[in-house]
């Protein structure tokens, strides 16, 4: 098996090689190397002939994954099949780190901010401001800890908070909070570089969450998510904040609704704000509640930004673990289902979202309120003559 350094790849004429991205579909949502063709690692295992049909035998085949591990297996298999194939050393992570060099951070910041004010005002800033107003997410005197994970959603949220603060319609303070749960050096540098590039003055604190959950076999993602939230609440309160802001967007909301029904047997949603049950006086808010993920991706790509996905110890491809503890595989499955339904019903996403605003308790068999369970039979006979309908 042959490996190729990124520096060596950059010396090759672009028409001499074909880039193959073998990461999963959840990972490529966070970006790909320019010109790459996506063929997931799982596809090579399931249908090698279909994969080979997409490859060019007249070119060098350069395979990359997240860190250059799985790509070695694929490159070796392709070499056995007669392809001049290479594994990209360091994978997509190496590409990201290379992009940190020689950046004009001031120019990047100006472009990102101008794009929010002009090109993406309607799709990003307006729904952000609407959510803040509709759900009263920002109130006079608030001190909000804007929690930045390093991904596209939380980084954009930070920029939107900076923009809305400039409007001076309300007095509030912001602290841009980054928790390092045990990132490797490259991922830590990527977060710091992107924050500098976007003009976000981050406050970074460290924890040992990754080490703590590394030996957990059952539901490590759920435990990690719960611990992360606890650490963020604790640090935010220590810094004088009364709220933490998380970067969940509209698509997260509708996917959570559907996942709850299909996998949890319950009807519930990801609320725009919540009172903390363990940290008295603290609240959690979700200002991207009405912002579409596709529009976040467009802003990211327009500004040529590359963000951290997730860097936990459990998956080579670093699939995203959401704040509710669900891995990207289940969420991606739900995302695909919604996209399929949208083909025949263009309003399906809006209808899923609105379903949580149009709950009719007279048509619900059973529900819970403040921990108390209610059944429709509890009041059924009170609404009639006192006996069953004939």
Image: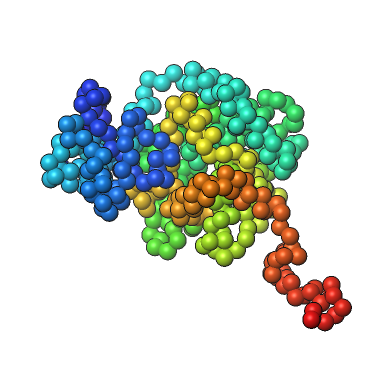
At horizontal 43% and vertical 38% (from top left) the residue drawn is 30
- Check the picture and name the quadrant holding the N terminus: top left
Q: Note whether residue 206 is visible.
A: yes
Q: Note whether residue 228 is visible.
A: no
Coloring basis for residues:
rainbow
- Check the picture and name the quadrant holding the C terminus: bottom right
**Picture layout, residue 50 above or below residue 10:** below
At horizontal 72% and vertical 43% (from top left) the residue drawn is 135
At horizontal 44% and vertical 47% (from top left) the residue drawn is 320
Task: Pinpoint residue 170: horizontal percent, then vertical percent.
Answer: 75, 31
Indicate left or right for 299 with 285 as reference: left
Task: Pinpoint residue 183: horizontal percent, then vertical percent.
Answer: 41, 43
Give the image quarter of residue 191. top left
Indicate left or right for 19 with 28 as reference: left
**Picture layout, residue 47 above or below residue 9:** below
Q: Pick out the residue farthest to the right.
A: 385
Task: Pinpoint residue 136: horizontal percent, then vertical percent.
Answer: 73, 41
Q: Nearer the viewer, residue 204 or 62?
A: 62
Task: Pinpoint residue 145: horizontal percent, then vertical percent.
Answer: 61, 39
Indicate left or right for 330 with 371 as reference: left
Q: Nearer the viewer, residue 231 or 54?
A: 54
Q: Nearer the viewer, residue 250 or 349?
A: 349
At horizontal 70% and vertical 66% (from top left) the residue drawn is 364
Q: Nearer the viewer, residue 384 or 378?
A: 384
Number of numbered discs: 0
């Amino acid at each position: 098996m042959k490996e190729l350094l990124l520096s060596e790849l950059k010396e090759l004429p672009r028409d001499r090689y074909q880039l193959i991205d073998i990461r999963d579909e959840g990972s490529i949502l966070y970006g790909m190397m320019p010109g790459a063709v996506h063929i997931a690692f799982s596809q090579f295992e399931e249908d090698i002939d279909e994969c080979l049909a997409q490859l060019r035998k007249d070119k060098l085949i350069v395979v990359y994954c997240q860190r250059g591990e799985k790509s070695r297996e694929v490159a070796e298999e392709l070499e056995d099949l007669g392809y001049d194939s290479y594994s990209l050393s360091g994978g997509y992570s190496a590409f990201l780190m290379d992009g940190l060099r020689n950046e004009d951070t001031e120019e990047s910041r100006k472009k990102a901010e101008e794009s929010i004010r002009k090109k993406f005002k309607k799709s990003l800033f307006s729904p952000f401001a609407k959510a803040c107003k509709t759900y009263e997410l920002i109130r006079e005197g608030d001190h909000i800890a804007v929690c930045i994970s390093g991904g596209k959603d939380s980084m954009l949220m930070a920029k939107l908070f900076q923009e809305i603060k400039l409007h001076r319609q309300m007095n509030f303070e912001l602290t841009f909070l980054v928790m390092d749960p045990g990132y490797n050096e490259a991922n830590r540098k990527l977060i710091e570089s992107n924050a500098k590039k976007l003009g976000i003055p981050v406050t970074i604190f460290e924890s040992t969450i990754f080490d703590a959950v590394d030996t957990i076999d059952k539901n490590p993602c759920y435990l990690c998510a719960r611990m992360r939230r606890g650490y963020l609440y604790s640090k935010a309160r220590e810094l004088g904040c009364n709220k933490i802001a998380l970067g969940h967007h509209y698509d997260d909301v509708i996917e959570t609704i559907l996942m709850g029904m299909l996998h949890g047997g319950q009807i519930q949603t990801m609320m725009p704000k919540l009172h903390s049950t363990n940290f008295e006086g603290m609240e959690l808010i979700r200002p991207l509640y009405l912002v579409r993920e596709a529009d976040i991706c467009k802003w990211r790509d327009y500004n040529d930004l590359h963000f951290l996905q997730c860097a936990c110890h459990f998956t080579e491809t670093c699939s995203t673990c959401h704040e509710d503890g669900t891995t990207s595989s289940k969420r991606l499955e739900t995302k695909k289902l919604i996209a399929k339904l949208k083909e025949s019903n263009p309003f399906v996403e809006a209808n899923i979202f609105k379903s949580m605003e149009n709950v009719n308790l007279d048509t619900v068999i059973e529900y819970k309120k403040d921990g108390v369970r209610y059944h429709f039979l509890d009041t059924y006979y009170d609404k009639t003559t006192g006996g069953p309908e004939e």
